[in-house]
Image (spheres, rainbow, N blue to C red):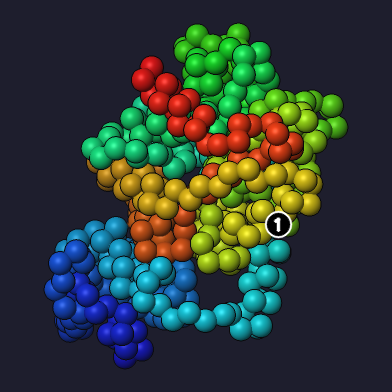
């Protein structure tokens, strides 16, 4: 108890956290501060607190999932926000390099966890994406079912509007020409492929390893009236170059996080081989702003086994080996935080439906995941990168004006 109190005393300075224990004692930490939450929690037994002390990286999540940590004022989003907001990554923190031991440990964990060979990739994807389309329909945008960072160019946009704006933002960077072939790696439920087929005279081929996603994607393409322009295939991207396929444009949104650090070179080797000489690729991925790191234990165990959030440095370093030119790089910064808060609201609003589909422990796990991710994008080192690649330096216009013009035209439609 003293150890946890000491940690909370130093970690909660702005905003307040009141902790109640099974023996009836209460301890309050912090000072009420505008912009910071006030939260009250209760431990239902001593084991819950011991769980956190034994393994802080996953103990708090499992204590909350199992009902040993109960929120009596505020919710899990506010609790995680309070703790993370008091230690923001981008200001006030001590600037120091990792020790050689920490670097070596992180590298070993990441490499072992990230050996995401084709044999395990499908299993890892199924862990997260084949848990049922009905769950995702409860919190994703209704029109496109985009399970990735939306784009909020204006205040007051709905999630649906922001996801449509994201698709326009990406499409503009692809500089698509009539008659081209487009490959969508990690196509999800087909939202990007369908959008491109509706707005351009192109053929789009979407690939995924999720059986649940691909079946719904086919239905959605038929309903959208573009099934003659869009095809979907259950295949690993690593298998495609051997078939001699070539594409004028490649887009990949929210898939690179599943590749695994050990497979970065293979990913860029494959995409370079799949891209025509005049081709353009747009990679949209969650990223780290502070250099390479490791995937936390909770995420590895419950959310994205085999996944890894890349730093910009290691992403570009891997792509450079195959002469892919990073022709444009954008950091979306807070856009995913806005997106995650919308998903969280919809999950909370659909609590009973989610529990009926899954169970209450899953519901708590899921909203803990969304709360932790939100805090990481608001106060931690997480962001989203959009990297545009070309193979030839003369492929695209010399200035970025074409992007804005194309995006504006798409949004006006």
Residue 1 is situated, as x and y percent measured from the top left of the image, at 31, 87
Q: Is residue 29 above or below residue 201?
A: below
Compared across the picture, whether 289 is left or right of 312 comes to left
Q: Is residue 370 visible?
A: no
Q: Nearer the viewer, residue 228 or 88?
A: 88
Q: Which residue is at the far bottom?
A: 2
Label count reads 1
Q: Does residue 369 appear left or right of residue 42 in this picture?
A: right
Task: Tell me which residue sits at (51%, 47%) in the image.
Answer: 330
Name which quarter of the figure residue 64 lies in: bottom left
Instruction: Name the quarter where the C terminus is drawn.
Output: top left
Seen at 36% across and 76% down, the residue is: 92
Depicted 175 relative to depicted 150: above or below? above
Q: Secondary structure at mark 1?
A: helix
Residue 98 in the image, given as x and y percentages of width and height: 58, 80
Quarter of the image for residue 20 reads bottom left
Residue 71, can we see it? yes
Please tell me which residue is depicted at 27% across the width and 44% down the height of the picture: 345
Which residue is more in the foreground, 277 or 207? 277
Q: Is 79 on the left-hand or right-hand side of 73?
A: right
Picture quadrant of residue 12:
bottom left
Residue at position x 40%, y 48% in the image: 336
Q: Position of residue 102 (x, y in %)?
A: 62, 79
Using residue 125 as the reference point, say whether residue 16 is left or right of it. left
| Residue that carries the numbered disc 1 in the rendered image | 317
């Amino acid at each position: 108890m003293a150890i946890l109190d000491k940690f909370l005393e130093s970690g909660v300075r702005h905003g307040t956290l009141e902790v109640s224990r099974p023996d009836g004692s209460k301890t309050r930490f912090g000072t009420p501060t505008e912009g910071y939450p006030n939260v009250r929690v209760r431990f239902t037994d001593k084991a819950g607190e011991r769980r956190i002390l034994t393994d802080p990286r996953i103990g708090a999540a499992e204590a909350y999932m199992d009902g040993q940590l109960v929120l009596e004022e505020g919710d899990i989003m506010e609790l995680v926000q309070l703790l993370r907001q008091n230690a923001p990554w981008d200001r006030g923190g001590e600037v120091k390099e990792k020790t050689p031991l920490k670097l070596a440990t992180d590298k070993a964990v990441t490499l072992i966890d990230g050996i995401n060979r084709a044999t395990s990739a499908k299993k890892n994807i199924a862990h997260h994406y084949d848990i049922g389309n009905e769950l995702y329909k409860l919190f994703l945008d209704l029109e496109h079912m985009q399970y990735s960072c939306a784009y909020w160019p204006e205040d007051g946009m709905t999630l649906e509007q922001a996801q449509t704006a994201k698709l326009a933002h990406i499409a503009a960077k692809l500089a698509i020409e009539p008659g081209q072939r487009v490959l969508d790696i990690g196509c999800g439920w087909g939202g990007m492929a369908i959008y491109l087929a509706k707005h351009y005279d192109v053929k789009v081929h979407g690939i995924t390893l999720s059986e649940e996603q691909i079946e719904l994607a086919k239905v959605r393409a038929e309903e959208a009236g573009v099934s003659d322009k869009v095809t979907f295939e259950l295949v690993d991207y690593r298998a495609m170059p051997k078939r001699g396929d070539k594409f004028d444009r490649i887009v990949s949104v929210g898939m690179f996080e599943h590749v695994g650090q050990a497979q970065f070179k293979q990913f860029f080797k494959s995409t370079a081989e799949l891209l025509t000489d005049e081709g353009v690729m747009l990679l949209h991925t969650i990223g780290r702003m502070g250099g390479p790191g490791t995937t936390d234990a909770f995420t590895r165990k419950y959310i994205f086994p085999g996944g890894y959030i890349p730093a910009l440095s290691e992403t570009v370093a891997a792509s450079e080996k195959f002469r892919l030119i990073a022709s444009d790089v954008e950091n979306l910064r807070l856009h995913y935080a806005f997106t995650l808060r919308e998903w969280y609201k919809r999950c909370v609003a659909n609590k009973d439906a989610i529990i009926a589909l899954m169970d209450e422990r899953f519901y708590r796990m899921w909203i803990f995941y969304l709360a932790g991710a939100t805090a990481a994008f608001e106060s931690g080192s997480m962001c989203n990168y959009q990297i545009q690649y070309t193979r030839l330096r003369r492929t695209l216009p010399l200035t970025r004006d074409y992007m804005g013009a194309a995006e504006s035209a798409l949004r006006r439609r």
